Image (cartoon, rainbow, N blue to C red):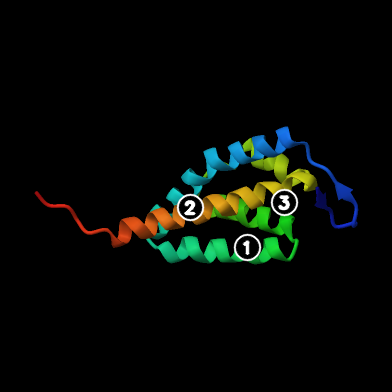
Amino acid sequence: MYADTNNHNIEVDPVVIESLNQISGGYSALFWEILYGTSESLNAIKNTVLLLTLLYEEGKYYEAILLIHVHHDLLCMEYPMELELIEKVPELQEPFLDEFLLDADDIIIDYEYEANREPYFD
């Protein structure tokens, strides 16, 4: 159950939650990969995650979705139709962002591991 900005409790169907998790999982890797490839900096990812997390923790889900939208524009990426829907439906924003941020944490761990890995030579 999630609270909206009007202090109503809105229950999001578990099937919808699973769909949001799949949308995030299928989409976030490409988003972070393009951001990393464009900026050539893990700090760009970490700073973006920090901003999204701060907005998320303040309950500013719409603003966090807009930040993702702006990043698409800056990276010349097509904004996915699924995110357009999430942007318009407040009940979907919090559960999507929750999964999106979890996916981002996993990706940061992967990039940090790759950056610190010893090169393998025969």
Residue 49 in percent (x, y) is at: 55, 61
The local secondary structure at tag 1 comes to helix
- Please indicate whether residue 9 sits to the left or right of residue 73 in the image: right
Q: CA distance from mark 1 to mark 3?
A: 11 Å
Residue 9 in percent (x, y) is at: 88, 50
Mark 1 or 3 closer to N-term?
Answer: 1
**Residue indicated by mark 3:** 94
Q: Which mark is residue 53?
A: 1
Q: Amino acid at mark 1?
A: Thr
Which quadrant of the figure has residue 113?
bottom left
Q: CA distance from mark 2 to mark 1?
A: 14 Å
Q: Residues within 10 Å of mark 2 (few under 14, many from 20)?
A: few
Is residue 35 visible in this depiction of the protein? Answer: no
**Residue indicated by mark 2:** 106
Mark 3 or 2 closer to N-term?
Answer: 3
Q: Residues within 10 Å of mark 1 (few under 14, many from 20)?
A: some
Residue 111 in percent (x, y) is at: 38, 56
Q: Residue at x 65, y 67 (%)?
A: 54
